Every structure is written in structure tokens, then in C-alpha cells.
Amino acid sequence: MSSVDIGIDLGTANTIITIGGKGIVINEPSVVAYDKKKKRVLAVGADAYKMIGRTPEYIIAVKPLRDGVISDNETTEAMVAAFIKKVSSSMMLKPRIILCVPSSVTDVENRAVVEAALSAGARKVFIIKEPIAALLGAGIDISKAKGTMVVDIGGGTTDIAVASFNGIVQDTSIKIAGNKFDDAIIKHISAKYKILIGEKTAEQAKMQLSNVYNPDASRTMVVKGRNLIKGLPESLEISEADTYDALIDLVEEITLGIRNVLERTPPELVGDILASGIILTGGGALLGGLDKYIQKHIGAPCYVADNPLECVARGVEAAFDLSEDLMDGFEKISIYRYK
């Protein structure tokens, strides 16, 4: 990967940017702060995230990607352009850029982010889909005629794919991922205890207490929120059993998605997956007991990739070294060369 190569993992929750020779240089929330009066972008990433809930009504902090798809082309374009300019301002040559996008984006949405990259000074732009980037980042050789399954659980979507011989054989995208896990914990605590907790508190509970395979009710933590009846602040002790009850239905849906993909996969490739296992990537892969749950209900080995949070970003970076092969025969890479 050259020093003028930029890789961008465009995620629902976070945008991660890599530069040749330097690795990851930006890992910031996918948020844009916009001034409606002056009709201009004020900030992107971490600076914009700090403004959520703390601005006058004419300044809005928005997340341009929702549930794994681009909900606002204009703000997404502005965010991508701002990030690229932030990391490429000192470059003498125009960079090549690979953009990793959710697998469910449309051609129109692809064009929007490509236009943003080109307007920010890219000389060539590639699009790669998340499951392929995740496999590359996990160190899997996808050039062989051998079936490999990846389950990439991000912030907005879970992408499930079977790849073989430089192509995706079967795949699906489910709008259940990290954000939905947080929402489920909030709803469960609210319904059971009549305490409303915030998103960050729910995320902490997910990270510290989640166990969807064998929950231990003796493991607890204290959360703080507002009593919905009294309207006053209140502390509450919750356990692994609470997060299990909140998350198990969503985990079952992800497992059903894996089953559906396998049912459409040729038996020879299913045999490969039975031997090599299912790879979990993305932040959601860190959900306690998820690998064991999937292994039990699918019947194939299942394991979490090394550093799953950065798998997609590392895969985007690795794709530059394979660009010639990918350009010639990789059906899931789109190449845009606008004049």
C-alpha cells in the first residue's frame, strides 16, 4: 500500500481511515454537524459527536448512515470529503482511495460517495463491500476455490456472506447489529424496571454483562437512569440474565440469517465451512457467548477474528495490494473512473 493510498471503512457508527505505511490514522464517529442558517458543514467525526444534544436548533448533528444504509447522500458526501481532506492535505500526489460500504447500498449511494472522494482530490476510487473487506482483514485467502463464511456485525447491519474463488457465492444483510443491541437493552430495562437508561449506559451494559450462551445471574453492574413513574434519578443493579433476556431474540434472528445463507450455499462449500468454521468480525462479534451460541445452533465451528473491530479497515488496506487481481476478476469490486 503506497503512501498516497487511502482506505475508508464507511460504517454506521464509526468511520475508520487508513493510509499506506501508517495504518489507521482516523477512527471517529460517523456524525456531521450542519448549520442550517449558513447551509454549511461545521464539523465531522468526533467534533460533531460532541455537539449531539448540545446545540441551538439551527445546528443539527446527524448520523448520515442509518441501519447500514446511507440515509442522507448530501451529508454523507460532505463527511467523506471532509475526512479525506483531513488526511490528504499534505500529500503531493492525488491519492487512490478504496471506500468500504455496507453491502446493501444502492448504485446511487455508491455514486454519491465516489463523487465525494473525487471532489476531495482522489485520482482513482474503488468500492469494496464489507464482507469481503472483513475476510481480507481477518487474513483469509479468498482466491482459492474454498468456501469461507463471515458474519460481520457492525453498528447498523450484520452482513453474512459465503465467499469462494474471489467472489461472493451467497450473502444477506440484516438490519440487526450493535445499535439494535443497545436499543433492546434500553427497552428491556424500561419495561421490566421502569427505569430509562441512556444509549451510552446500555452500551456499557452490553460490553460488560452480555452473555447470550450461558448467563450468570450473579454477575451484576449498577446502571443509572430516570424512574419513569417518579421522574427522578435512580440507580439499579442489573445482571447477565437481564442482558440475555434483552438480546436473545436478536441473536436468534442473526442465527436464522446464517442458516438461510447456508441453505442456499452449494453443499461442497458447506462442507468447507464445516471444516474451517464461521468467522465473526465487527464490534458485535465481541458480544459475550455469541460464538458459542452460533456454533451450538448451526453445528459448524465458530470463532471471533483477531481484533474484530478493525478487521474491515485492515481488509480495505490489504485490498490495495490485491488491486490488480481484484480489478480483473473480482465481481464485488466496482471501479469508477470519471473524467
Image (spheres, rainbow, N blue to C red):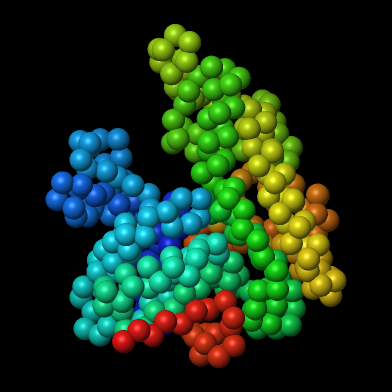
Q: Is residue 183 above or below residue 197?
A: below
Query: Does 92 sit left or right of 250 as displayed?
Result: left
Residue 147, percent from left and from top: 74, 74
Determine the image quadrant of residue 30: bottom left
Instruction: Point out the image quarter for the N terminus.
Output: bottom left
Instruction: Point out the image quarter for the C terminus.
Output: bottom left
User: Can residue 161 be seen in the rendering of this structure?
Assistant: yes
Q: Looking at the picture, tell me which residue is in the foreground, 190 or 296.
A: 190
Across the whole image, how many numbered discs are drawn on residues? 0
Q: Residue at x 73, y 41 (%)?
A: 213
Query: Does 161 sit left or right of 110 as displayed?
Result: right
Furthest residue to the top?
A: 230
Q: Is residue 321 above or below residue 310?
A: below
Residue 103, percent from left and from top: 55, 64
Q: Residue at x 35, y 84 (%)?
A: 338
Residue 261, percent from left and from top: 74, 62
Furthest residue to the front?
A: 108
Q: Residue at x 46, y 82 (%)?
A: 335
Residue 305, percent from left and from top: 61, 61
Determine the image quadrant of residue 152: bottom right
User: Can residue 312 be seen in the rendering of this structure?
Assistant: no
Q: Residue at x 44, y 22 (%)?
A: 225
Furthest residue to the left?
A: 38
